[in-house]
Image (cartoon, helix red, strand yellow):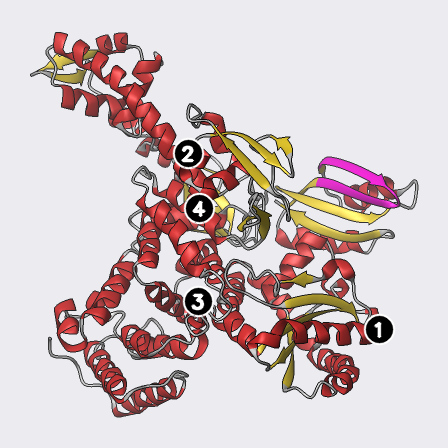
Amino acid sequence: MTETKPIAQDEKLLIQKAYRRMMRSIKTEVHPEDKVNIKRAYDMAVSAHADQRRKSGEPYVLHPIEVARICAAEIGLGPTAIICALLHDVVEDTPVTLEEIREIFGDKIARIVDGLTKLDGTYSYNSPQAENFKKVISTLIEDVRVVLIKMADRLHNLRTIGSMPHQKQLKIAAETNYIYSPLAHRLGLYNIRVEFQDLCMRITDPETYREISEKLQQSKNERNRYIQEFIRPLRKKLEQLNLPYRITGRPKSISSIWNKIQTKNVDFEEIYDLFAIRIIVDVPLDVEKNICWQIYSIVTDVHPPIPERLKDWITTPKSNGYESLHTTVIGPKGRYVEIQIRTERMDEIAERGFAAHWKYKGVKNQKDVYEMWLDNIREILEDQEHEDPVEFLSDFKTNLFKEEVYVYTPKGDMKILPKGATALDFAFSIHTDIGYHASAIKVNNKLVPMGYELQNGDQVHVTTNKNQKPNDDWIKMVKTGKAKSKIRSSLKEEKRKKGEFGKEALERKLKNMKVDFEQAVEFLVKHYNYNNHPELFYDIYKGEFDLAELKKFGVENHQLINKKVESPQEKTESKGEIAPSDRFKAKDSASKILVNGEPADQYHYSLATCCNPVQGDSIFAFFTAGSGLKIHRTNCPNSTHLMANYGYRVMKAEWVDKIGESFQVNLKIIGVDDGPGVIERLTTTISSKLGLNIRSFNIEGSGGYFEGNMSILVMNKNQMEIVIRTLKNLKGITNVIRTS
């Protein structure tokens, strides 16, 4: 190890304080040997990171200590994970080697640290993110603790992200929303998932986050008084059970409130169930279900229930092991209140997820839900046909579903599939061969199309035929990653076999031309933008690539060449990229956007139509493969996908202060249909009172309700907000929402 700079005395005290706090947070029993190894790991981390600082200026070692604390306190991991968390950056960022760690701590610790080192090393924005995520996911089947520690690492980075450049913050938020948040949900880490979503929203949509946060703060005292008023009559009846219980009340997360505002088309003030109340009882396993239903009966005796809001995840736990009884009741003043009823065991699994499942493994004689899920991941990872990492990631993400559907085999065995899964998905979930050879499917004894969307309680029977095999239409009929993966694999194998005939035809042709086969194939694949050799061979077999095309090229030293020398621009375009001359195409008008601090006029750029940014919106630039730069809003519906998979193409963008140009903005207007006059009020307000141009307007109404969509031209975001406020104040208008 190299010599390090001494740490200042005040910083030493700060580091020691952080270490003691971390040790106090360990919830599992720590053996003397583990204590010794934790202290060794701490000493190694302090020494190795001694001369390193975080962006904020604080000693770097505070980061791994805090990651270890999160692992212990918030995820519930034990000594092994704590040691690995303390060491998770030493091999990546310091002279410490993996061999040193193996020698001191043993092979198990070294393997996990190695996984974390590879994981952290993948976050280079010079390479495609999807390939990086594939490496992340591959650690799942080796040791899930690698991913859990990475969750803690990501959580601490997000909590302390303020010192990073905003563009880097956006990329990290996109990665988190795209993969880590759904992965946290799938591993049962609900609190971490919620915090991920809230922290990311604070980065991508700070104004909305701040607005909802302030409103929650303003209503905090009133909310607490209401919770006490709601609980008071419940306590009297719960005491009669003579069982240990506790009641907690908490507001919903900011991101979930915003999601409800958008999906329900309502204002903050119109959301009644802003908080959930949890009743947790401590009872033996064999009476859990009975006691939870007794408590449900007490709750619904005191407060009227809404029957359609009852969700029983005790009888049928979620696929990630979550158990709880949820219902919504009408409390005092007519407000909706969500109630969650569970036992201490259920609560620990709900809070700790995968980390807690080891403690209760097998206690209910149920299949290990995580092992079943990991088996699915293994199947996708072991499928060698996944040449496209974006395709792989898409398949994997279907295994991170939040909503599920419960269906049954003819023998009554239950299968859990993502909501939206089809009859063909069910066939592949039983066995790959049953999926491959599925010829007819019955649901509830009725013949259905293979693309039939499964509903809760469906009983599914699959008829197979050994001569049946997947075709191109099947990929459109399935939702699950396993089914997509297996169908693609089968189709690619079929294409490969047929492509062999095309390959033979090409070999004969090139032999006659006295051209080297390997060089010619590489040349043709690049020239015609094929993804790989088999695609070229298959097109030759189908006749979509005419071998007469070879006459276009010259032959020199047994190699195919272009007959004319390509210009640099043509070379670039043949690879699907933008030529320099197009990238820096000057415009006559003054620049209204800066890209990486320079006038955007030197680029070939345009505003993205998926989100229609206006002056004042937080924006970024995305370098496309063939259309120059596209300017997107940071909260664009497509931003998460673009930044997570192609972060290396994202560039910093910002508006010039004054532009003097109009932008199109789309608004959804919802209100009460009170007869003639609605359209006149809207158009008069926009055109006459506000003096703005309407690009398009359509409106539909029925049953006393109407919904309209309007596109108008505004100068900037401030003007757009004035329009929204003005329209909301009109008679009969209940809500106005900006849409993409």
Residue located beneath label 4 in the image: 642
Image depth: mark 3 or mark 4 in front: 3
Is the C-beta separation of discs 4 and 1 under 8 Å?
no
Badge 2 marks a residue whose secondary structure is: helix
Q: CA gap, disc 1 to disc 3?
A: 40 Å
Specify which label sits upstream in the sequence, 2 or 4: 2
On whether residue 696 falls in the magenta region, the answer is yes
Q: Residue furthest right?
A: 675
Q: CA gap, disc 2 to disc 3?
A: 30 Å
Q: CA gap, disc 4 to disc 1?
A: 45 Å
Image depth: mark 1 or mark 3 in front: 3
Q: Position of residue 201 (x, y in %)?
A: 54, 61
Specify which label sits upstream in the sequence, 2 or 3: 3
Specify which label sits upstream in the sequence, 3 or 4: 3
Badge 4 marks a residue whose secondary structure is: helix
- What label does residue 487 carry, if any? 2
Q: Position of residue 625 (x, y in %)?
A: 38, 35
Quadrant (top left, top right, bottom left, bottom right) of the N terminus: bottom left
Which range of residues does the magenta coloring cover? 695-710
Image depth: mark 2 or mark 4 in front: 2
Residue located beneath label 1 in the image: 333
Q: Is 581 displayed left or right of 636 in the figure?
A: left
Q: Position of residue 455 (x, y in %)?
A: 64, 45
Kindly identify the amino acid type of the residue bearing the numbered disc 3: Phe
Kindly identify the amino acid type of the residue bearing the numbered disc 1: Lys
Residue located beneath label 3 in the image: 354
Kindly identify the amino acid type of the residue bearing the numbered disc 4: Leu
Q: Quadrant of residue 665?
A: top right
Q: Position of residue 408 (x, y in %)?
A: 58, 47
- Observer-nearest residue: 50 or 599? 50
Q: Does residue 629 appear in this view?
A: no
